[in-house]
Image: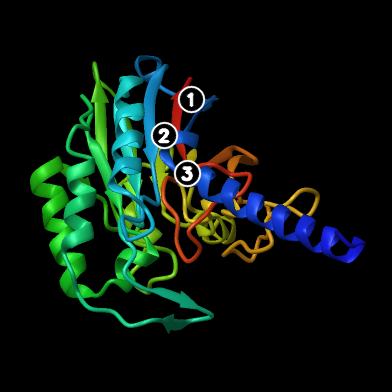
């Protein structure tokens, strides 16, 4: 074997192994459970230890299997959460790059139904709450409405579309808020906060963590904890370089994990599914459990 042929074989082999590892990272075999404890100042004593399961970016589609979503649901239920938060991108029917749609779109209920079937075992004593992601809106009004109704009827999901709900325990209370995807004109943090006392503890569900920009620009909105997805943890994360592409002007800041913005914490999950590329690299699919204290 010549030196040139040896080097070419080595390059091809490394590439094949990288793709294989990336595909392996995207399967249920690499699904990881991540636990965080978040301290919230002024949290009512009866809510200390409240456990929230965060599931995001399920992306039911040709490249995200029903088995993976089912495994994520089972992993979340094993932790016996008090609340389940679903933060959008339940299906993938089309992609947009720089604002332009990639590929054709035909309304199809198949993957929305598969997603609900995969989640059929989830329940939580204090409720399941959901918000919509950019891919859900990109699916079109017809499919969005079908999915919206299906999740509500089959899973008892309480949709928080620029709205909130008050949770009570023994006379004490906190608020769960939710907004439409940040890239949509319908997103309104103002409406979600309307009627909520300024001093109340607020947990916001927002598919896109960039909602932090709007909060930072306002001196009237106080959010204690944000639960998000959207970034897929970068989906492909390279050594030293990090994630070459993150759909956020903040770069790596809101890629994944816990981010501290003063008195406000944001928890961003890698999510469960994938889009555009049928692989993950150095950021496996993830179920997140947050305990607030």
Q: Decide: few, some or many residues near mark 3? Use Cα within 10 Å; few <14, some 14-19, many ≥20.
A: many
- In the picture of the structure, the residue carrying the numbered disc 1 is 42
Residue name at image x 24 percent, y 16 percent = 170
Q: CA distance from mark 2 to mark 1?
A: 8 Å
Are discs 2 and 1 less than 8 Å apart at CB? yes
- Give residue 5's position: percent from left, percent from top: 83, 64
Earlier along the polypeptide chain: callout 2 or callout 1?
A: 1
User: Callout 1: few (<14), some (14-19), or many (20+) C-alpha neighbours within 10 Å?
Assistant: few
Q: Which mark is residue 282?
A: none
Q: x and y percent of residue 259 in the render?
A: 62, 41
Q: Quadrant of residue 60?
A: bottom left
- Give the crowd class for mark 2: few <14, some 14-19, many >=20 residues within 10 Å: many
Of pointers 2 and 3, the one earlier in the residue sequence: 2
Disc 3: which residue: 226
Q: Residue at x 28, y 79 (%)?
A: 105
Q: Is residue 130 above or below residue 81?
A: below
Q: Which residue corresponds to mark 2?
A: 201
Question: Do we see residue 173 in this rendering?
Answer: no
Q: Residue at x 56, y 40 (%)?
A: 264
């Amino acid at each position: 074997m010549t030196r040139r042929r040896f080097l070419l074989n080595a390059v091809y082999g490394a590439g094949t192994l990288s793709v294989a590892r990336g595909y392996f990272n995207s399967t249920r075999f690499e699904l990881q459970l991540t636990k965080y404890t978040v301290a919230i100042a002024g949290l009512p004593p009866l809510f200390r230890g409240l456990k929230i399961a965060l599931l995001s970016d399920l992306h039911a589609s040709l490249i995200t299997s029903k088995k993976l979503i089912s495994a994520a649901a089972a992993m979340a239920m094993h932790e016996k959460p008090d609340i389940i938060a679903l933060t959008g991108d339940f299906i993938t029917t089309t992609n947009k790059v720089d604002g332009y749609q990639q590929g054709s779109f035909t309304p199809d209920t198949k993957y929305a139904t598969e997603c609900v079937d995969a989640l059929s075992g989830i329940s939580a004593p204090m409720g399941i709450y959901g918000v919509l992601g950019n891919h859900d809106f990109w699916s079109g009004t017809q499919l969005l409405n079908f999915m919206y109704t299906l999740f509500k009827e089959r899973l008892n999901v309480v949709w928080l579309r620029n709205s909130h709900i008050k949770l009570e325990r023994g006379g004490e209370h906190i608020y769960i808020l939710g907004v439409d995807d940040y890239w949509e004109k319908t997103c309104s943090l103002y409406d979600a906060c309307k009627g909520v006392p300024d001093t109340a503890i607020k947990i916001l569900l927002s598919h896109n963590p960039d909602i932090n920009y709007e909060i930072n620009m306002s001196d009237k909105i106080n959010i204690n904890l944000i639960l998000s997805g959207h970034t897929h943890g970068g989906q492909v994360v390279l050594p030293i370089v990090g994630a070459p592409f993150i759909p956020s002007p903040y770069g790596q800041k809101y890629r994944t994990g816990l981010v501290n913005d003063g008195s406000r914490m944001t928890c961003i999950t890698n999510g469960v599914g994938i889009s555009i590329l049928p692989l993950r690299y150095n950021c496996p699919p993830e179920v997140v459990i947050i305990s607030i204290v």
